[in-house]
Image (tube, rainbow, N blue to C red):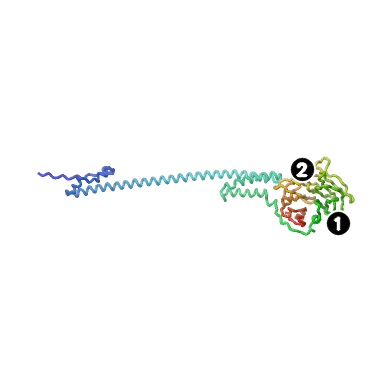
Amino acid sequence: SEEKEEEPKLPVIGKEEIDDDMSEGSYKESLNFGPSVRDDIRGGGRESFIKRLSAVGGILGRRRLRSSRIGGSRRTLLIVGAVIMLVLIFSSVFAINQRNSSQKKALFNKVYAQAQTKYDEGRNLVDLNRDLANESLKESQKILTENKDKFGKDSDEQKKILALLANVNKELGGASTSTSSGAKTVPNSESPYLANQIDNNSSHFAQDPSFVYYVGSSGVIRIDKGNDKETTIIEKDFGTVGGTGVYLANVYVLEKGSSSILKFTESDGDFTEGTYLAEDQKADLSKAVAIAIDGSLYVLFSDGSINKYLRGSEQTFAITGLKKALSGPSKIFTSRDIEKIYILDKGNSRIVAIDKEGKFLEEYSSSVIKSAKDFEVLEADKKILVLSGGKIYQITLK
């Protein structure tokens, strides 16, 4: 009998086989349409071929599903890695900012504490020793100035530093001790003392309530304030004079050549010459420029120093607390009726006020002072009168 041609068997594809077929080799084998497959088609085994083709399609579908899952896992890993990286960067930046903030805070605490200490020292020393007070205040000023820009603009730290610096500057220079004064002209009648100097070439004048005195070529001349009558009361060639003053009707003349202070005592209209300085006093008065008397006698020197004498003996005295040194001082003014000593500081265009222990109190600045010849102070009337350029100017006292 004729043998029947055996039909080709379709592969049985189970789960394990599908997994195996996902390999590259199995995949290619599944697509191998060799002679047997072509023979199946020719031999009428179309149904078998379709079944086999369906099996291959199932394998391909599972392969795409698995590839999709692998791609999703990779994307997840990338996202997680990026998040971790961002967290690390943020943590590093935060740590750096925290460290910088701590350093800034430590610097501020150090700077502010040092400056505050020096500021407090300066304020406590003001009434005791102005020079030492200024030293402490300047140290505080230096600390604050050098560090104020190390903190953010308008930050709380910078605001506190600038506020303290303003207080330091106020103590050092302050409006409370310096006045820029508007000088106004006044009639000559406001000051007979200064009016009598306008057309007089003498450099050394003094006054008491009734008279004006000056040293001329022939001696000491006295002018009556009531009628302007002039009288030579002391006939003497003094040589180079460094100042003259009057106290209780006694006339004092400082003679630079002999470094002596002559005292002329009045009795019945006559003046008897004597020496003011005690015998044991050896002073160099060659650079004296003016004197003033209030019971004690003050000698002003061209370098701005002052000697103080009481009953002919030198007393301890020095100007303290002056922020700017005197420059070209030419006149000194005081009396027993006023509380302060005033110095005409032409080089700095100002009049400086100190107390009678030498402590700096205040100053008055005006352009007319630079060319001033002389001045007087009327404390009770709250004014300073200045002779400058042939005119008398008034400056208001505090």
Relative to 285, say whether 228 is above or below: below
Q: Is residue 311 visible?
A: no
Give the structural element (helix, strand or loop) at label 1. Answer: loop
Quarter of the picture holding the N terminus: top left
Residue kind at label 1, given as amino acid type: Lys
In this picture, residue 363 sits left or right of residue 96: right
In this picture, residue 8 sits left or right of residue 324: left
Along the viewing direction, whichever of 91 and 343 lies nearer the viewer: 343
Residue kind at label 2, given as amino acid type: Thr
Q: Nearer the viewer, mark 2 or mark 1?
A: 1
Distance between the Cα atoms at labels 2 and 1?
Answer: 41 Å
Q: Which residue is mark 1?
A: 229
User: What residue occupies the far left of the structure in this picture?
Assistant: 1
Residue 293 placement (x, y as % from top left):
80, 48
Q: Is residue 175 visible?
A: yes
In this picture, residue 341 sits left or right of residue 106: right
Along the viewing direction, whichever of 220 and 96 lies nearer the viewer: 220
Q: Which residue is mark 2?
A: 316
